[in-house]
Image: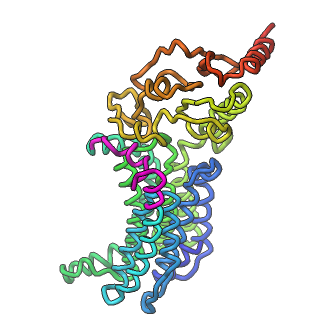
Amino acid sequence: MSLLRTVRRRLGRPESLFAEGLLLAFVLLYYPSNYWGLMGMETSLVTLWALLALRLALGQDETRVRVLPWLGVVLGLAFWTRPDALILAALLLAYRAYALGLRAWRVWFMEGLIVLAFVTALSLFRLVYYGALVPNTYTLKVGGMPLLPRLRDGLGFIAPYLATTTALFGLGLLGLMDGLRAWWQQLRANRRSWWRLDMTQRTLSLLALVVILHVAYQIWTGGDPWPYWRMLVPAMPALFVLAVLGLEWLMARLAQRLPAALGKLGALALAGFSISLALQPFLPELIFQKSAYRVGYHVILAERAVLLNEILRPGARLAVFSAGIVPYYTDFHVIDMLGKNDTYIASLPPDRSGAVSWHGMNSVPGHNKYDLFYSIETQQATYAERLSWGAQGLRVPRMTEIHLGRLSFFLDLSSPYVDQEALQARLAQAESATAP
Protein backbone atom coordinates (compact mmCIF):
# COMPACT_ATOMS: atom_id res chain seq x y z
CA MET A 1 0.00 0.00 0.00
CA SER A 2 2.79 2.39 0.93
CA LEU A 3 4.53 1.86 -2.41
CA LEU A 4 1.29 2.52 -4.32
CA ARG A 5 0.64 5.69 -2.34
CA THR A 6 4.19 6.88 -3.01
CA VAL A 7 3.83 6.20 -6.73
CA ARG A 8 0.46 7.97 -6.89
CA ARG A 9 1.87 10.98 -5.05
CA ARG A 10 4.74 11.20 -7.53
CA LEU A 11 2.24 10.97 -10.38
CA GLY A 12 0.15 13.77 -8.85
CA ARG A 13 -2.83 11.54 -8.11
CA PRO A 14 -4.87 11.43 -4.87
CA GLU A 15 -5.11 8.33 -2.71
CA SER A 16 -7.72 5.81 -3.82
CA LEU A 17 -9.23 3.09 -1.64
CA PHE A 18 -10.46 1.34 -4.77
CA ALA A 19 -6.93 1.18 -6.22
CA GLU A 20 -5.49 0.05 -2.89
CA GLY A 21 -8.14 -2.67 -2.64
CA LEU A 22 -7.23 -3.95 -6.09
CA LEU A 23 -3.53 -4.03 -5.21
CA LEU A 24 -4.22 -5.82 -1.93
CA ALA A 25 -6.27 -8.44 -3.78
CA PHE A 26 -3.48 -8.99 -6.33
CA VAL A 27 -0.85 -9.41 -3.60
CA LEU A 28 -2.91 -11.70 -1.38
CA LEU A 29 -4.15 -13.90 -4.21
CA TYR A 30 -0.87 -14.40 -6.04
CA TYR A 31 -0.10 -18.00 -5.15
CA PRO A 32 3.65 -18.27 -5.92
CA SER A 33 4.57 -15.56 -3.41
CA ASN A 34 2.46 -17.24 -0.72
CA TYR A 35 3.82 -20.67 -1.66
CA TRP A 36 7.48 -19.75 -1.33
CA GLY A 37 6.84 -17.90 1.91
CA LEU A 38 5.13 -20.92 3.46
CA MET A 39 7.88 -23.21 2.15
CA GLY A 40 10.46 -21.19 4.07
CA MET A 41 12.49 -20.07 1.06
CA GLU A 42 14.29 -16.75 0.90
CA THR A 43 11.92 -15.45 -1.78
CA SER A 44 9.57 -13.63 0.60
CA LEU A 45 12.45 -11.91 2.39
CA VAL A 46 13.98 -10.78 -0.92
CA THR A 47 10.54 -9.45 -1.92
CA LEU A 48 10.33 -7.51 1.35
CA TRP A 49 13.75 -5.94 0.78
CA ALA A 50 12.80 -5.08 -2.81
CA LEU A 51 9.59 -3.35 -1.67
CA LEU A 52 11.39 -1.40 1.06
CA ALA A 53 14.13 -0.34 -1.35
CA LEU A 54 11.62 0.84 -3.96
CA ARG A 55 9.67 2.73 -1.32
CA LEU A 56 12.85 4.45 -0.05
CA ALA A 57 14.13 5.28 -3.54
CA LEU A 58 10.82 6.76 -4.65
CA GLY A 59 9.79 8.28 -1.35
CA GLN A 60 12.32 11.08 -1.14
CA ASP A 61 11.46 14.56 -2.34
CA GLU A 62 14.11 14.95 -5.04
CA THR A 63 14.15 18.73 -4.59
CA ARG A 64 15.55 18.25 -1.08
CA VAL A 65 18.44 15.91 -1.66
CA ARG A 66 20.01 13.96 1.18
CA VAL A 67 21.73 10.63 1.63
CA LEU A 68 19.39 7.69 2.25
CA PRO A 69 21.58 5.39 4.35
CA TRP A 70 18.71 2.97 4.89
CA LEU A 71 18.44 2.48 1.13
CA GLY A 72 22.02 1.21 1.06
CA VAL A 73 21.42 -0.96 4.13
CA VAL A 74 18.26 -2.53 2.69
CA LEU A 75 19.95 -3.24 -0.63
CA GLY A 76 22.94 -4.69 1.22
CA LEU A 77 20.66 -6.96 3.25
CA ALA A 78 18.93 -8.03 0.03
CA PHE A 79 22.35 -9.01 -1.34
CA TRP A 80 23.11 -10.97 1.81
CA THR A 81 19.78 -12.75 1.47
CA ARG A 82 20.33 -13.66 -2.18
CA PRO A 83 23.37 -12.39 -4.10
CA ASP A 84 21.46 -11.88 -7.36
CA ALA A 85 19.63 -9.03 -5.60
CA LEU A 86 22.69 -7.05 -6.68
CA ILE A 87 20.84 -6.55 -9.97
CA LEU A 88 18.07 -4.65 -8.18
CA ALA A 89 20.67 -2.73 -6.19
CA ALA A 90 22.46 -1.65 -9.38
CA LEU A 91 19.15 -0.55 -10.92
CA LEU A 92 18.08 1.54 -7.92
CA LEU A 93 21.50 3.14 -7.51
CA ALA A 94 21.51 3.98 -11.23
CA TYR A 95 18.03 5.46 -10.80
CA ARG A 96 19.23 7.59 -7.89
CA ALA A 97 22.21 8.80 -9.92
CA TYR A 98 19.96 9.72 -12.85
CA ALA A 99 17.24 11.34 -10.75
CA LEU A 100 19.61 13.40 -8.59
CA GLY A 101 22.14 14.25 -11.29
CA LEU A 102 25.86 14.85 -11.16
CA ARG A 103 25.60 17.81 -8.82
CA ALA A 104 24.42 15.49 -6.07
CA TRP A 105 27.02 12.84 -6.80
CA ARG A 106 28.11 12.62 -3.16
CA VAL A 107 24.61 11.46 -2.19
CA TRP A 108 24.25 8.48 -4.49
CA PHE A 109 27.98 7.74 -4.22
CA MET A 110 27.64 7.33 -0.43
CA GLU A 111 24.59 5.10 -0.90
CA GLY A 112 26.59 3.01 -3.33
CA LEU A 113 29.46 2.77 -0.82
CA ILE A 114 27.08 1.36 1.79
CA VAL A 115 25.97 -1.35 -0.64
CA LEU A 116 29.61 -1.97 -1.59
CA ALA A 117 30.46 -2.47 2.09
CA PHE A 118 27.87 -5.26 2.35
CA VAL A 119 29.07 -6.85 -0.90
CA THR A 120 32.72 -6.66 0.19
CA ALA A 121 32.02 -8.06 3.67
CA LEU A 122 30.18 -11.11 2.33
CA SER A 123 32.69 -11.66 -0.47
CA LEU A 124 35.62 -11.59 1.99
CA PHE A 125 33.82 -13.99 4.31
CA ARG A 126 33.14 -16.30 1.36
CA LEU A 127 36.79 -16.11 0.31
CA VAL A 128 38.06 -16.91 3.81
CA TYR A 129 35.51 -19.60 4.61
CA TYR A 130 34.96 -21.24 1.21
CA GLY A 131 38.04 -20.12 -0.70
CA ALA A 132 36.05 -18.46 -3.50
CA LEU A 133 34.80 -14.95 -4.22
CA VAL A 134 31.65 -16.00 -6.05
CA PRO A 135 28.94 -18.34 -4.71
CA ASN A 136 29.35 -22.00 -5.56
CA THR A 137 25.79 -21.96 -6.94
CA TYR A 138 26.89 -19.41 -9.56
CA THR A 139 29.58 -21.80 -10.81
CA LEU A 140 27.13 -24.69 -10.59
CA LYS A 141 24.31 -23.08 -12.54
CA VAL A 142 26.09 -20.86 -15.05
CA GLY A 143 29.66 -22.12 -15.31
CA GLY A 144 30.39 -24.13 -18.44
CA MET A 145 26.91 -23.62 -19.91
CA PRO A 146 27.11 -21.80 -23.27
CA LEU A 147 25.01 -18.67 -23.53
CA LEU A 148 22.71 -19.63 -26.41
CA PRO A 149 21.60 -23.02 -25.00
CA ARG A 150 21.13 -21.33 -21.65
CA LEU A 151 18.93 -18.65 -23.18
CA ARG A 152 16.88 -21.30 -25.01
CA ASP A 153 16.34 -23.13 -21.75
CA GLY A 154 15.45 -19.88 -20.00
CA LEU A 155 12.90 -18.99 -22.67
CA GLY A 156 11.45 -22.51 -22.59
CA PHE A 157 11.08 -22.33 -18.83
CA ILE A 158 9.57 -18.84 -18.67
CA ALA A 159 7.13 -19.29 -21.57
CA PRO A 160 4.24 -20.47 -19.33
CA TYR A 161 4.82 -17.52 -17.00
CA LEU A 162 4.66 -15.06 -19.88
CA ALA A 163 1.55 -16.77 -21.27
CA THR A 164 -0.39 -16.75 -18.00
CA THR A 165 0.76 -13.26 -17.00
CA THR A 166 -0.07 -11.71 -20.38
CA ALA A 167 -3.16 -9.90 -19.09
CA LEU A 168 -1.26 -8.41 -16.15
CA PHE A 169 1.49 -7.28 -18.51
CA GLY A 170 -1.15 -5.72 -20.75
CA LEU A 171 -2.60 -3.79 -17.82
CA GLY A 172 0.91 -2.77 -16.80
CA LEU A 173 1.47 -1.40 -20.29
CA LEU A 174 -1.71 0.64 -19.95
CA GLY A 175 -0.33 1.92 -16.66
CA LEU A 176 2.64 3.29 -18.57
CA MET A 177 0.48 5.09 -21.13
CA ASP A 178 0.55 8.56 -19.55
CA GLY A 179 4.32 8.47 -19.25
CA LEU A 180 4.79 7.06 -22.74
CA ARG A 181 2.51 9.66 -24.31
CA ALA A 182 4.30 12.53 -22.59
CA TRP A 183 7.69 11.11 -23.59
CA TRP A 184 6.57 10.73 -27.23
CA GLN A 185 5.36 14.33 -27.37
CA GLN A 186 8.63 15.44 -25.83
CA LEU A 187 10.57 13.40 -28.38
CA ARG A 188 8.64 14.90 -31.28
CA ALA A 189 9.37 18.39 -29.99
CA ASN A 190 13.09 17.75 -29.45
CA ARG A 191 14.71 14.47 -30.43
CA ARG A 192 17.81 15.23 -28.37
CA SER A 193 15.78 15.24 -25.18
CA TRP A 194 14.85 11.53 -25.36
CA TRP A 195 16.80 10.77 -22.19
CA ARG A 196 15.32 13.58 -20.08
CA LEU A 197 12.45 12.11 -18.08
CA ASP A 198 10.18 13.98 -15.71
CA MET A 199 9.12 12.56 -12.34
CA THR A 200 6.14 10.66 -13.77
CA GLN A 201 8.24 9.11 -16.52
CA ARG A 202 11.08 8.24 -14.13
CA THR A 203 8.74 6.58 -11.66
CA LEU A 204 6.92 4.49 -14.24
CA SER A 205 10.16 3.58 -16.00
CA LEU A 206 11.71 2.34 -12.76
CA LEU A 207 8.75 0.07 -12.01
CA ALA A 208 8.83 -1.29 -15.56
CA LEU A 209 12.59 -1.90 -15.42
CA VAL A 210 12.26 -3.85 -12.16
CA VAL A 211 9.94 -6.28 -13.95
CA ILE A 212 11.94 -6.40 -17.19
CA LEU A 213 15.26 -7.05 -15.44
CA HIS A 214 13.86 -9.90 -13.36
CA VAL A 215 12.39 -11.54 -16.46
CA ALA A 216 15.66 -11.06 -18.37
CA TYR A 217 17.67 -12.47 -15.46
CA GLN A 218 15.48 -15.57 -15.25
CA ILE A 219 16.03 -16.18 -18.96
CA TRP A 220 19.78 -15.53 -18.67
CA THR A 221 20.18 -18.08 -15.87
CA GLY A 222 18.59 -20.76 -18.03
CA GLY A 223 15.47 -21.34 -15.96
CA ASP A 224 14.80 -22.85 -12.55
CA PRO A 225 14.02 -26.39 -11.37
CA TRP A 226 10.55 -25.43 -10.05
CA PRO A 227 7.89 -23.70 -12.20
CA TYR A 228 6.59 -21.51 -9.39
CA TRP A 229 8.44 -18.37 -10.52
CA ARG A 230 10.77 -18.16 -7.53
CA MET A 231 13.09 -15.61 -9.15
CA LEU A 232 10.21 -13.52 -10.50
CA VAL A 233 8.13 -13.12 -7.34
CA PRO A 234 10.17 -10.12 -6.02
CA ALA A 235 9.22 -8.16 -9.15
CA MET A 236 5.50 -8.92 -8.98
CA PRO A 237 4.57 -6.03 -6.61
CA ALA A 238 5.98 -3.58 -9.18
CA LEU A 239 3.92 -5.28 -11.91
CA PHE A 240 0.82 -5.20 -9.70
CA VAL A 241 1.24 -1.45 -9.10
CA LEU A 242 1.52 -0.86 -12.86
CA ALA A 243 -1.51 -3.09 -13.46
CA VAL A 244 -3.59 -1.09 -10.97
CA LEU A 245 -2.51 2.14 -12.67
CA GLY A 246 -3.52 0.55 -15.98
CA LEU A 247 -6.95 -0.31 -14.63
CA GLU A 248 -7.38 3.30 -13.48
CA TRP A 249 -6.30 4.56 -16.90
CA LEU A 250 -8.91 2.29 -18.47
CA MET A 251 -11.60 3.39 -16.01
CA ALA A 252 -10.90 7.03 -16.84
CA ARG A 253 -11.44 6.29 -20.52
CA LEU A 254 -14.60 4.29 -19.83
CA ALA A 255 -15.97 7.09 -17.63
CA GLN A 256 -16.17 9.28 -20.73
CA ARG A 257 -18.77 6.90 -22.21
CA LEU A 258 -20.23 4.91 -19.32
CA PRO A 259 -21.47 5.60 -15.79
CA ALA A 260 -18.69 5.46 -13.18
CA ALA A 261 -20.23 2.40 -11.50
CA LEU A 262 -20.12 0.43 -14.76
CA GLY A 263 -16.52 1.50 -15.29
CA LYS A 264 -15.58 0.13 -11.87
CA LEU A 265 -17.42 -3.11 -12.54
CA GLY A 266 -15.55 -3.46 -15.82
CA ALA A 267 -12.24 -2.80 -14.07
CA LEU A 268 -13.06 -5.39 -11.41
CA ALA A 269 -13.97 -7.95 -14.06
CA LEU A 270 -10.74 -7.31 -15.95
CA ALA A 271 -8.71 -7.46 -12.73
CA GLY A 272 -10.37 -10.76 -11.83
CA PHE A 273 -9.67 -12.19 -15.27
CA SER A 274 -6.02 -11.07 -15.17
CA ILE A 275 -5.21 -12.55 -11.77
CA SER A 276 -7.24 -15.71 -12.54
CA LEU A 277 -5.18 -16.26 -15.69
CA ALA A 278 -1.95 -15.83 -13.71
CA LEU A 279 -3.21 -18.30 -11.10
CA GLN A 280 -4.50 -20.89 -13.58
CA PRO A 281 -1.48 -23.28 -13.25
CA PHE A 282 -1.89 -23.29 -9.46
CA LEU A 283 -5.69 -23.59 -9.29
CA PRO A 284 -5.84 -27.23 -8.08
CA GLU A 285 -3.71 -26.27 -5.08
CA LEU A 286 -5.65 -23.07 -4.44
CA ILE A 287 -8.96 -24.93 -4.20
CA PHE A 288 -7.38 -27.83 -2.27
CA GLN A 289 -7.90 -30.43 -4.97
CA LYS A 290 -4.31 -31.52 -4.38
CA SER A 291 -1.64 -30.79 -1.81
CA ALA A 292 0.89 -28.02 -2.30
CA TYR A 293 3.67 -28.66 -4.80
CA ARG A 294 6.24 -31.21 -3.53
CA VAL A 295 4.89 -31.21 0.01
CA GLY A 296 4.19 -34.96 -0.17
CA TYR A 297 7.79 -35.56 -1.24
CA HIS A 298 9.02 -33.37 1.61
CA VAL A 299 7.04 -35.48 4.08
CA ILE A 300 8.76 -38.59 2.73
CA LEU A 301 12.15 -36.92 3.13
CA ALA A 302 11.35 -35.98 6.72
CA GLU A 303 10.31 -39.58 7.45
CA ARG A 304 13.53 -40.76 5.86
CA ALA A 305 15.57 -38.43 8.06
CA VAL A 306 13.84 -39.79 11.19
CA LEU A 307 14.58 -43.34 10.02
CA LEU A 308 18.24 -42.62 9.27
CA ASN A 309 18.70 -41.21 12.75
CA GLU A 310 17.49 -44.58 14.06
CA ILE A 311 19.48 -46.98 11.88
CA LEU A 312 22.78 -45.12 11.37
CA ARG A 313 25.56 -44.34 13.80
CA PRO A 314 27.70 -41.19 14.05
CA GLY A 315 30.26 -41.13 11.23
CA ALA A 316 27.85 -42.28 8.51
CA ARG A 317 28.06 -40.49 5.17
CA LEU A 318 24.88 -39.70 3.23
CA ALA A 319 24.89 -39.23 -0.55
CA VAL A 320 21.73 -37.24 -1.39
CA PHE A 321 20.11 -35.45 -4.30
CA SER A 322 17.67 -33.47 -2.16
CA ALA A 323 20.18 -31.74 0.08
CA GLY A 324 17.76 -29.85 2.31
CA ILE A 325 15.44 -31.77 4.62
CA VAL A 326 17.54 -34.89 5.27
CA PRO A 327 20.73 -32.97 6.15
CA TYR A 328 18.71 -30.54 8.30
CA TYR A 329 17.10 -33.26 10.42
CA THR A 330 20.18 -35.48 10.73
CA ASP A 331 23.68 -34.93 12.04
CA PHE A 332 25.67 -36.97 9.54
CA HIS A 333 28.23 -35.95 6.93
CA VAL A 334 26.26 -35.19 3.76
CA ILE A 335 27.48 -35.54 0.17
CA ASP A 336 25.48 -33.36 -2.19
CA MET A 337 25.44 -35.31 -5.45
CA LEU A 338 24.15 -32.28 -7.40
CA GLY A 339 26.97 -30.06 -6.20
CA LYS A 340 25.35 -27.12 -4.44
CA ASN A 341 27.98 -27.40 -1.72
CA ASP A 342 30.60 -29.34 -3.68
CA THR A 343 33.07 -27.32 -5.74
CA TYR A 344 34.21 -30.36 -7.72
CA ILE A 345 30.69 -31.16 -8.93
CA ALA A 346 29.96 -27.46 -9.56
CA SER A 347 33.02 -27.19 -11.83
CA LEU A 348 32.05 -30.16 -14.03
CA PRO A 349 30.73 -29.61 -17.56
CA PRO A 350 26.91 -29.63 -17.62
CA ASP A 351 24.97 -32.55 -19.07
CA ARG A 352 23.39 -31.12 -22.23
CA SER A 353 22.22 -34.48 -23.60
CA GLY A 354 18.61 -33.93 -22.55
CA ALA A 355 18.84 -36.57 -19.82
CA VAL A 356 18.18 -33.90 -17.19
CA SER A 357 15.30 -32.00 -18.76
CA TRP A 358 11.90 -30.83 -17.59
CA HIS A 359 9.59 -27.78 -17.64
CA GLY A 360 10.78 -26.59 -21.05
CA MET A 361 14.50 -26.85 -20.26
CA ASN A 362 16.87 -29.23 -22.02
CA SER A 363 19.47 -28.94 -19.24
CA VAL A 364 18.12 -27.91 -15.83
CA PRO A 365 20.48 -25.54 -13.97
CA GLY A 366 21.63 -26.79 -10.60
CA HIS A 367 20.70 -30.37 -11.55
CA ASN A 368 22.76 -30.93 -14.71
CA LYS A 369 26.19 -31.58 -13.14
CA TYR A 370 26.91 -34.86 -11.40
CA ASP A 371 29.47 -37.65 -10.98
CA LEU A 372 27.84 -40.54 -9.15
CA PHE A 373 31.02 -42.62 -8.91
CA TYR A 374 32.79 -39.72 -7.21
CA SER A 375 29.89 -39.02 -4.85
CA ILE A 376 29.11 -42.59 -3.84
CA GLU A 377 32.28 -44.63 -4.34
CA THR A 378 35.14 -42.17 -4.03
CA GLN A 379 33.57 -40.55 -0.97
CA GLN A 380 32.54 -43.93 0.47
CA ALA A 381 28.91 -43.14 1.13
CA THR A 382 27.14 -45.26 3.72
CA TYR A 383 23.73 -44.27 2.36
CA ALA A 384 22.70 -43.31 -1.17
CA GLU A 385 19.34 -41.84 -2.09
CA ARG A 386 19.56 -43.34 -5.58
CA LEU A 387 22.19 -44.97 -7.80
CA SER A 388 21.09 -43.27 -11.02
CA TRP A 389 20.64 -39.73 -12.27
CA GLY A 390 20.41 -38.30 -15.75
CA ALA A 391 22.63 -40.28 -18.10
CA GLN A 392 24.48 -42.13 -15.33
CA GLY A 393 23.64 -45.32 -13.49
CA LEU A 394 25.88 -47.22 -11.06
CA ARG A 395 26.05 -50.82 -10.01
CA VAL A 396 27.58 -50.77 -6.54
CA PRO A 397 27.92 -54.32 -5.12
CA ARG A 398 28.42 -53.09 -1.55
CA MET A 399 25.12 -51.20 -1.66
CA THR A 400 21.84 -53.02 -0.89
CA GLU A 401 18.45 -51.60 -1.75
CA ILE A 402 16.27 -51.23 1.33
CA HIS A 403 12.46 -50.99 1.24
CA LEU A 404 10.60 -49.82 4.31
CA GLY A 405 7.02 -49.00 3.48
CA ARG A 406 7.07 -46.11 1.05
CA LEU A 407 10.73 -45.43 1.78
CA SER A 408 13.40 -46.94 -0.46
CA PHE A 409 17.13 -46.21 -0.57
CA PHE A 410 20.53 -47.91 -0.67
CA LEU A 411 22.71 -48.84 2.31
CA ASP A 412 26.21 -50.25 2.67
CA LEU A 413 25.30 -53.08 5.04
CA SER A 414 28.96 -53.89 5.64
CA SER A 415 29.58 -50.44 7.11
CA PRO A 416 30.21 -50.18 10.85
CA TYR A 417 28.05 -47.06 10.79
CA VAL A 418 24.88 -49.08 10.13
CA ASP A 419 23.10 -50.17 13.29
CA GLN A 420 22.16 -53.68 12.21
CA GLU A 421 19.93 -54.29 15.21
CA ALA A 422 17.88 -51.16 14.64
CA LEU A 423 17.67 -51.84 10.89
CA GLN A 424 16.46 -55.41 11.39
CA ALA A 425 13.88 -54.20 13.90
CA ARG A 426 12.52 -51.69 11.41
CA LEU A 427 12.49 -54.28 8.60
CA ALA A 428 10.57 -56.70 10.82
CA GLN A 429 8.15 -53.96 11.77
CA ALA A 430 7.55 -53.09 8.10
CA GLU A 431 7.07 -56.76 7.20
CA SER A 432 4.52 -57.30 9.95
CA ALA A 433 2.64 -54.18 8.89
CA THR A 434 2.20 -55.56 5.36
CA ALA A 435 1.42 -59.13 6.41
CA PRO A 436 -2.16 -60.32 5.69
Quadrant where the C terminus is found in the figure:
top right
Residue farthest along the bottom direction in this orientation: 64
Residue 329 lies in quadrant: top right
Q: How is this picture coloured?
A: rainbow
Magenta stretch: dominant secondary structure = helix
The residue most toward the left is 191
Q: Is residue 290 left or right of residue 109?
A: right
In this rendering, does residue 46 appear at all?
A: yes
Q: Is residue 14 left or right of residue 405?
A: left
The residue at 49%/68% (across/down) is 76
Residue in the foreground of this view, choosing between 128 and 431: 128
> Where in the figure is residue 195, as x and y percent of width and height?
26, 77
Give the image location of residue 394, x and y in percent: 46, 18
Report x, y in % for residue 30.
Answer: 58, 54
Residue 350 is a magenta residue: no
Judge from the rendering whether residue 43 lies leftward or rightward of residue 198; answer left or right.
right
Q: Quadrant of the N terminus?
A: bottom right
| Quarter where residue 344 is shown | top left
Q: Position of residue 324 (x, y in %)?
A: 59, 40
State yes or no: residue 131 in magenta: yes
Q: Is residue 132 above or below residue 303?
A: below
Q: What number of labels is visible?
A: 0
Residue extending farthest top:
436
Which residue is drawn at the image coordinates 53% and 63% (left, top)? 267
Q: Tell me the magenta residue range.
A: 124-146
Q: Is residue 46 above or below residue 307?
A: below
Q: Is residue 255 visible?
A: no
Residue at position x 40%, y 31% in the image: 357
